[in-house]
Amino acid sequence: MTKAPLFQKLSFNFAILLLPTLVMAEATPEREAVADLPLNRFVDVTNLEALGNLVVTDTKVAQSRESATQNIEIVGSDAMERQPLYNRNIAELLRYTSGQFVNVLSRNDANWGSYAGLGPKYNSYLLDGLPIDSFVDPMSLDPWAFERIEAHKGPASVLYPNYLSMDFAGNEAPLAGTTNLILKDRIETSATRLQVGYGSFDTIGGRAYHQGRTGELSYFAGASEERSDYAQYGAPQSWLQTVNSPNYDKTKAYGKASYAFGRPDHTVSLFVHYTHHNGDMGRPNRLFEHDYGTLNLAYNNQILPNLHLQFKLGERYYDREFDNDNYPAGLTLTSTSKTKQRIRPLDVTLSFRHWNAALLSVGVDHQQVEYQTTNRIADNVMPENDVDSESLGVFLQEKIQWRDWVFRAGVRHNTISHDYALLSGKVPTLRSKEWDKYLWSAGLRYMVTDEFSIYANAGSSFMAPAAKQIGGTIGSPGDSGQLPNPGLSPEAGVGKDVGFNWQATKTLNLAARVFHNELENAIIDSVVSAIPSQTLASNSGSATAYGIELDLRHAPLDAVQWFANLTLTHTRVEDPLNAEQNNTAIPFAPDQVANIGITASGFWGVTVSPYLHWVGRYYDSTVRDSRQEFGDYALVNMRVQKELLRRQSSVLNVSLDLNNLTNEHYRMPFDFRDVGFNTFATFDISF
């Protein structure tokens, strides 16, 4: 791949976008206090109420939640601690938020849910604002490293790029929103936490965490391991049918160090995370072994009182290996599939505060991707796909606060290029492809009163077909995986929403959001075979999803708080040239999702947190005659916590998770099914 043209475009476009910033900086003689532009690290915020009201995802620096034109839902550390462990996937921490459907297939597999009526690839994931994989990384990362999670609803494709993943469902776009996992950063006090647990299926686990501070250096480190005999998580007589317990062993290690150069708004930090996940799928020749690595390097500097710079660089590697057998004919080893992917994201953003309360964000981001798949039969290794990809984006966003109004508008120019060395084991005729696109986004919020606000947003997106969708991943005809479709073409989308937020009383909050998303030439993955499990990506004419989210939160007593939300969605795929899939529903998107949760503390210091999760009807394919119907089930989970001992700064807690209390073995796509009722108990000591 020739790198020069992309970086020539970078230097030209970045200079054009930076020019207004430099001009306005020169034309603004007054210098406002550093506190007027808080950093993206919530520094110097000691008031918990103020901390809970800050968000970073809408501008990349900390701003008040009321100043964001988008609806941003916050999941704090307390909320994370109240939720029961289910499949050990971070996406499940958002299961009970409106507008999305979390559908983690098993403890060994990813989330195949939906966001605002669109499939799993239309909500990107971020780690401190730098892209990660929405399928892999929630299975890998440990939530003990997080300060909080921000679920940004609505189009976010100006400030944040697509993630050029070639695995799972392919590229991921922030059309329906983005989920930002925010790491702990400035550590004020030393603390240590240890946890051991045991539960159903002979599941045993242990976790350790320590944080501290030495002068200007803040740090934390942690590790965990979990082993289980597990249970059959596939439908009987399916490609996931087991003859033994599907054992797994998952080990994690992570740490972060952050150094302040004499002041809290000039820092450099490094975060590293490693996960090793191995086991079998319940048959002697269905072994798997995965290694995931994550690195984030970040530099923040308040260059001037009204000018902030952040530089972020990352490394993500995903090594995944599966053995395949010839089930149901037999259990003999037939092949070994291996996927290797390296993704290196970069982001440089300047934030310029002007006109008292206006914020201009200008920057550039880049991704470099290496993707290879191989298939080994006996000692013969056969390369299947070998693709390099690159993305270069330049963006500008202005947000103006005037009286009771907030106005936001932005534009992005993106260049995406693919170099194909191999597709489906062959050297393709078309060796490279490049796309240049402009994207836009706009929004507003009006504070009718201090307690009631309305907002509206709109934005565009673009998604190129991934190498996995073009070249497939099936080495032998009987293997499970992705079928190739070399004729795929890109898609484009537009997302819109309007809503309100009303703090009706001090303890009661009501909110609603109406969303409307459109895709042209939509790339849709459909299940085309059950045994073996095979999917195919294809272009449809268009796809539309619209619906409404309704939210209620209430804390009638200091010891009792509860919430309820409902999401109603209508989706349609229109493809007049293909009668089989014309006027069908978008796969993986239920027509209804409802949640109710309560946290009550009372007798003998026991805290009880039950949750009800209702899922309506959805499908796994757009092909009317062969699609399967799923949903129409209720999932009830509960966590019970008790403080056993408290002495000075040491606390001993015990908790019990009761998952799937009604023992629903509900079916999921790709012939997965829930394992039913299960428990997990932990002893947790902090000091």
Image (cartoon, rainbow, N blue to C red):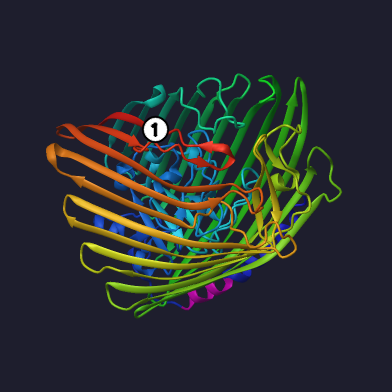
- The reply, left or right, for residue 611 in relation to residue 129 is left
Residue 535 horizontal/vertical position (percent): 67, 44
- Residue designated by label 1: 222
Q: Is residue 158 left or right of residue 662?
A: right
Residue 264 in sight in this render: no
Task: Please check the rendered image and state whether residue 20 is part of the magenta-colored stretch, yes or no.
Answer: yes
The residue most toward the front is 625
- Residue 291 screen position, x and y as percent: 56, 31
Residue positioned most to the bottom: 403
Q: Nearer the viewer, residue 83 or 81?
A: 83
Q: Nearer the viewer, residue 47 or 473?
A: 473
Q: Is residue 112 left or right of residue 560?
A: right
Question: Could you tell me residue 504's position as x and y percent?
Answer: 24, 69
Q: Is residue 660 left or right of residue 103?
A: left
Magenta range is 19-27
Quadrant for the C terminus in the image: top left
Is residue 156 placed above or below 273 in the rendered structure? below
Residue 423 magenta: no
Crowd around label 1: few <14 · some 14–19 · many ≥20 (10 Å): many
Q: Can residue 389 be seen from the camera position used here? A: yes
Which residue is outermost to the left?
Answer: 604
Task: Count the labels in the image.
Answer: 1
Front-most of 548 and 665? 665
Compared with residue 69, is residue 50 higher up or lower down, i.e. above or below?
above
Where is residue 143 drawn, in percent x and y?
Answer: 40, 41
Numbered disc 1: secondary structure: strand
Q: Residue at x 48, y 53 (%)?
A: 129
- Residue at image position (31%, 42%) is 81
Q: Amino acid at mark 1?
A: Gly
